[in-house]
Image (tube, rainbow, N blue to C red):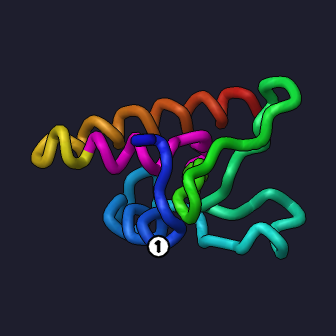
Amino acid sequence: MSQYTTIEEAKSLAKALGDIGGGVLPYIPAAQDRDNKSGIYIPEYLSGPFMTPSDGKRKFYHFRFKNGGDGFNAGLIKATMAFAPTRWPVMIALEVNAAGASHRSDD
């Protein structure tokens, strides 16, 4: 359950992340995100014939950052913020920046 957030929570978390990874890309509603460029998105669930997990309005939202890092679960970021209220910016920045650097080296 900790991996789910509402879209409102995801937007608030994206704002709280500030400039980490250059910031979360702007949110584009799924119906309009034909190029998969939204900063808040639900990844395609590839585990067999099962639907993407959700809990009512709480969904499996993830973040995509301007530095190219993506795949960061909003619910887990929320949990990290609660677990490490003073250290989360450094902890998350290290992961997002490493993912962004990896993305750039793949180009």
Residue 60 vs 57, above or below: the answer is above
Q: Position of residue 56 (x, y in %)?
A: 58, 60
In-front residue for pair 103/32:
32
Q: Residues within 10 Å of mark 1 (few under 14, many from 20)?
A: few
Q: Quick one: which residue is furthest to the front in this view?
A: 56
Residue 50 vs 63, above or below: the answer is above
Which quarter of the figure has residue 36? bottom right
Which quarter of the figure has residue 12? bottom left
Q: Is residue 103 visible?
A: yes
Asked if the stretch drawn in magenta spans residue 76, the answer is: yes
Q: Position of residue 22 (x, y in %)?
A: 47, 58
Q: Residue at x 72, y 73 (%)?
A: 29
Q: Quick one: which residue is furthest to the top in this view?
A: 48
Lateral position of residue 10 relative to residue 19, left or right? right
Q: Which part of the image, by quadrant, shows the C terminus? A: top right
Residue 105 vs 43, above or below: the answer is above
Q: Give the magenta range.
A: 67-80
**Residue type, numbered disc 1:** Glu
Tag 1 residue: 8
| Callout 1 secondary element | helix
Q: Residue at x 18, y 39 (%)?
A: 83
